[in-house]
Image (cartoon, rainbow, N blue to C red):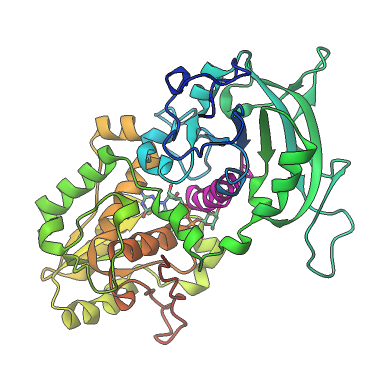
Amino acid sequence: VFACLDLRLTECKKKEDDAFNVGINDTPDFQASKPVRYLLYNVNPGEGFNLRRDVYIRVANLVKLLNDDEPWALVLPPWGRIYHWQTREISQIKLPWSLFFDLESLRRHIPVLEFEEFLAVSEKPMIEEVYYLQRYKEGWTKWEEKMDIRECLDKHGYSKGKDSRWHHWFFGYGDDVYANKFECMSYMGHAGFIKPFLMHNSSARSVFLDRAESLIHGQYSEWSPLYWSGRRSMVFAKHLRDIGDNFREKYLGSTDKKDKTVLDDWTKMNKKHGDAKGGPYLAIHLRRKDYLYAHGEEIPSIQYVPKKVKSILEKHKLKKVFVATDSPDAEFEYLKQEFGEKVEVYRFKPTPEEHEKYKDGGVAIIDQWICAHARYFIGSYVSTFSFRIQEEREILGFEPEMTFNRLCNDDNDTCEQPSKWTIKY
Ligand code: GFB
């Protein structure tokens, strides 16, 4: 018996009736046929792209746990209105996940569908229940897992109309999409802690958890195989990988075969540290812009970067540097000059067509992909953008010493280096 994925069906029929092939291979057979339920979520609007990727893993693993007992599919929140995507000339809302990620790979972990696919299979543009996760008003003194439906504490952006429906921005679809029920929930717990509530206290076909960053990793922390399964399933979209690979080959003399970074179906990959060699270049992620205010004391000034990097280049006999950065062109040109003539310094620049098509988010992913394939990588202090590159390199099988590095500030050469979050299978 197969779980049916079409909201219009209350009873499941044959496999062919499924409106979408949403990870059907991963959907377990259930004793009695049960219609699929849909979990939707969103994250605090202020959060950046790479923290959002971490929240995805927590929610995805919640869906994984739910699927042990009943069929649930995760509705992927469209990308948009991200503070760091500052190119005004291009439209950057309602972006589907397939723009950035390989959906087939995500589906090897859990059943997922795009928000528009969810709308297409829904009878009405309606989400049955919304829970807005929030803190406890009284604060807390000791950690304990708990959840309570409570009065709302903060501005949440949902309002009840005369039609008794709840209205909200809903990723830019708010003119049409509405919710039937809205409640605030004070929550302190791991992602899996909400599972019994979803199974027994709600029978809605679609449940939306807003501020899902409140669900913490718990038993699937950074160290656990389940965290890594979720993480490994987040393979970048092929069109972005291809652009990065072409750039590597053309400017950096780097190809997968030579560099031992061939990518396979993630469920079949199990690389050991040292399996990957990487291309003949050093990559550095230089987080600038708002980072200068947030963490200015922990990062070097631009003129110090070459001074610090040159000895590493010599040690590893490398002559090329790839720079991923959010800094303006002038700063990059200055940096290039400071490296001197003996070092070739590169930066990825999309064509206007590529930029229009793949947006600021796609360009950032291409930068991450090129960094992930370098022989040696240097990240920025506690940047989630750098963390995700480090993870990519763990998946590819680099030696941790070639990955978990950062530059100290101008006056210091012995600052603490990043923790080694090594892969677990
Ligand atoms: O990804 P993210 O959360 O990383 O946010 P942090 C940084 C964003 O800036 C990226 C752009 O998602 C990109 O859009 N960006 C940063 C880059 N570095 C690069 C780069 O090398 N290349 C390209 N193309 N784009 C945190 C934020 O950022 O920093 C917080 O999440 C806060 O909201 C804090 O702003 C100071 O973890 O680095």
Q: Nearer the viewer, residue 301 or 203?
A: 203
- Percent across and percent down for residue 255 are 12, 56
Query: As displayed, is residue 332 above or below residue 379?
Result: above
Residue lying at 72% horizontally and 40% vertically, measured from the top left: 199
Residue lying at 76% horizontally and 44% vertically, measured from the top left: 197
Q: Quadrant of residue 183?
A: top right
Q: Is residue 50 left or right of residue 192?
A: left
- Magenta segment boundaries in residue numbering: 42-63
Q: Determine if residue 330 is in view.
A: no
Q: Quadrant of residue 424?
A: bottom left
Residue 205 lies in the magenta stretch: no
Q: Determine if residue 203 is in view.
A: yes
Characterize the magenta stretch by its predominant secondary structure: helix
Label total for image: 0
- Percent across and percent down for residue 84 are 48, 45
Residue lying at 31% horizontally and 56% vertically, measured from the top left: 324
Q: Nearer the viewer, residue 189 or 265?
A: 265
In the rendered image, the quadrant that contains the C terminus is bottom left
Query: As displayed, is residue 293 above or below residue 247?
Result: below
- Percent across and percent down for residue 235 are 35, 47
Residue lying at 20% horizontally and 60% vertically, measured from the top left: 261
Query: As displayed, is residue 192 above or below residue 14?
Result: below
Q: Is residue 288 left or right of residue 44?
A: left
- Percent across and percent down for residue 251 are 12, 54
